[in-house]
């Protein structure tokens, strides 16, 4: 497998609460736009649902459509991104949705991680293109 690394910046974040929980937490839906740099030069749009606890920590899951270039190959693909927010840091695990890649990235498979502690962060992505 090849490895891609780089950084990302949050371009926009739109989040709305759709349910307040009796425990003091809440459920939200978010649409977040990212710009990626490094081995992945791309734009990503992530639609997610989040469950916040009363202490401000959260768990989240969602799908991100990513369009751009991975190691010089142009195309798009969808990532499932699951993770947690705790201590001011968001950590997520990525997995390419099988069959979602197109263009020169058709046949892409892979997993990765992302860590953000502010308006941006870093990622590592292990992948192969069949």
Image (cartoon, grey):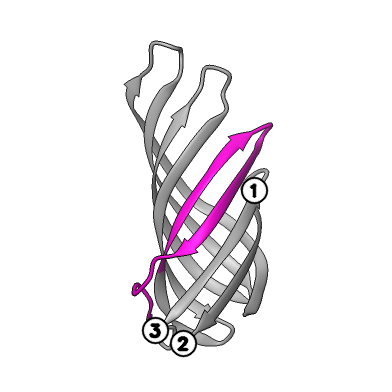
Compute the Cα span from label 3 to label 1. Answer: 28 Å
Compute the Cα span from label 2 to label 3. Answer: 8 Å
Asked if residue 100 is among those painted magenta in the image, a careful observer would answer yes
Which residue ends up furthest to the left in the rendered image? 18
Compute the Cα span from label 1 to label 2. Answer: 30 Å
Q: Which residue is mark 1?
A: 116
Q: Which residue is mark 2?
A: 130
Q: Tell me which residue sits at (51%, 22%) in the image.
A: 53
Residues 30 and 49: in front is 49
Is 117 positioned to the left or the right of 43 in the image?
A: right
Q: How many marks?
A: 3
Q: Tell me which residue sits at (54%, 81%) in the image.
A: 128
Q: Position of residue 113 (x, y in %)?
A: 61, 57
Residue 106 shows which numbered tag?
A: 3
Give the quadrant of the N terminus: bottom right
Residues 99 and 48: in front is 99
Q: Position of residue 32 (x, y in %)?
A: 44, 50
Residue 88 shows which numbered tag?
A: none
- In this picture, is 100 found above or below 107? above
Q: Which secondary structure lies at badge 3? A: loop
Closest to the camera, between mark 3 and mark 1, is 3
Q: Which secondary structure lies at badge 1? A: strand
Q: Earlier in the sequence, mark 2 or mark 3?
A: 3
Q: Tell me which residue sits at (58%, 19%) in the image.
A: 55
Is 124 positioned to the left or the right of 13 in the image?
A: right
Identify the magenta region.
78-102
Q: Position of residue 37 (x, y in %)?
A: 62, 69
- In this picture, is 92 found above or below 19? below
- In this picture, is 27 found above or below 105? above
Q: Position of residue 44 (x, y in %)?
A: 45, 62
Q: Earlier in the sequence, mark 1 or mark 2?
A: 1
């Amino acid at each position: 497998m090849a490895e891609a690394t780089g950084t990302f910046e949050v371009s926009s974040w739109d989040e709305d609460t759709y349910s307040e929980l009796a425990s003091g937490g809440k459920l939200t839906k978010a649409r977040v736009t990212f710009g990626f740099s490094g081995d992945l030069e791309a734009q990503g749009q992530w639609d997610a649902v989040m469950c916040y606890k009363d202490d401000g920590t959260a768990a989240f899951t969602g799908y991100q459509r990513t369009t751009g270039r991975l190691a010089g190959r142009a195309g798009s693909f969808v990532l499932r991104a699951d993770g947690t927010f705790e201590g001011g840091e968001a950590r997520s695990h990525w997995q390419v949705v099988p069959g979602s890649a197109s263009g020169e990235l058709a046949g892409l498979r892979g997993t990765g991680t992302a860590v953000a502690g502010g308006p941006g962060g870093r990622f590592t992505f292990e992948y192969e293109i069949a």
